[in-house]
Amino acid sequence: MKILNNKAELLDFVADIKKQNKNIGFAPTMGALHNGHLSLYKVARENNDIVISSIFVNPTQFNNREDLEKYPRTIAHDIEKLKNSELVDAVYIPTVNDIYPNGLSSKQYNFNGLENEMEGAARPGHFDGVGTVIEALFGQIQPDDAYFGEKDYQQLKIIETLVKNLKLSVKIHGVAIHRQEDGLAMSSRNARLNNEEKNASTIIYKTLKQVNDWFRVISIPEIKERVVEIFEKQDNMELEYFLIADEENLKETDFFYKDKNYRAFIVVNVGKVRLIDNIHLE
Ligand code: PAF
């Protein structure tokens, strides 16, 4: 596996691949790699000749300084994990200047309103930061396909919109949420939970599965009340939001329509760690 430590090294690598007429699958990350990331590479490996990943903790997508500072950085472990996986041909570890040559600021995007829902409302500027780094990485890597986890479902929809609006020629793939055996969605932030918090956090997915059982049986306001009650009973946990939204436009709904698909979205603060999860409602 090649380690590409700056933009110049990356551009050489990409030029060589393009010369060979091979296609590129790309999975961007912020490091602290776990098996959820490996599941992205596995799909990429099946679809593409060459798989590139990137590791870059993107400052502009953090609206909270402490969150940025505390974000786990485990680069040596990440490189080991990537090598052992044998799923990735090259990892790009850009410098801040490679991504932000004109200074650390985000572009302003219009994601057709998706940016105003859920995480966009809770974390002002977050999706402008994500859009900026992804546009830069796509520009440099020129992938044919790119892979994003459904855990950040709103991010996935935002990237699809970015690609459509900018008429980029990369195909975006959503990859199903990778969960631990106990149901907790794999996330780099889980590394910040102690054992007790980790065990307690399994209530998040258990609740989402219950929501799926209640879907189209009781009303959405009733489902929301029950979810609030569940989290009121948990120690050291605060429900930041729970809602059910149309899977395409991400608008919250209080009613189900027959011909539409819905997803339940949840954010819970466990101690100081903000966990996010969602489920497609059957
Ligand atoms: O999902 C993430 O890890 C990040 O938001 C991404 C897509 C790598 C952009 O920094």
Image (tube, rainbow, N blue to C red):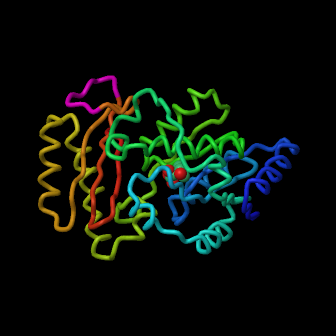
Residue at 23% x, 44% y is 213
Question: Nearest the camera: 138 or 226?
Answer: 138
Question: Nearest the camera: 6 or 198?
Answer: 6
Please state the horizontal and vertical placement of residue 168, each as a whole percent of the image: 65, 31
Q: Quadrant of the N terminus?
A: bottom right
- Looking at the image, how many numbered discs can be counted on the residues? 0
Q: Quadrant of the C terminus?
A: top left
Relative side of 116 to 207, left or right: right
Q: Is residue 153 magenta?
A: no
Residue at 58% x, 32% y is 163
Q: Is residue 257 magenta?
A: yes
Please state the horizontal and vertical placement of residue 218, each as a whole percent of the image: 14, 37
Please state the horizontal and vertical placement of residue 216, each as a whole percent of the image: 21, 34
Q: Which secondary structure dominates the residues rendered in magenta? A: loop
Relative side of 267 to 93, left or right: left
Residue at 79% x, 57% y is 9
> Which quadrant holds residue 93?
bottom right
Relative side of 8 to 245, left or right: right
In the image, residue 170 above or below residue 279: above
Please state the horizontal and vertical placement of residue 158, each as a whole percent of the image: 48, 37
Magenta-drawn segment: 252-260
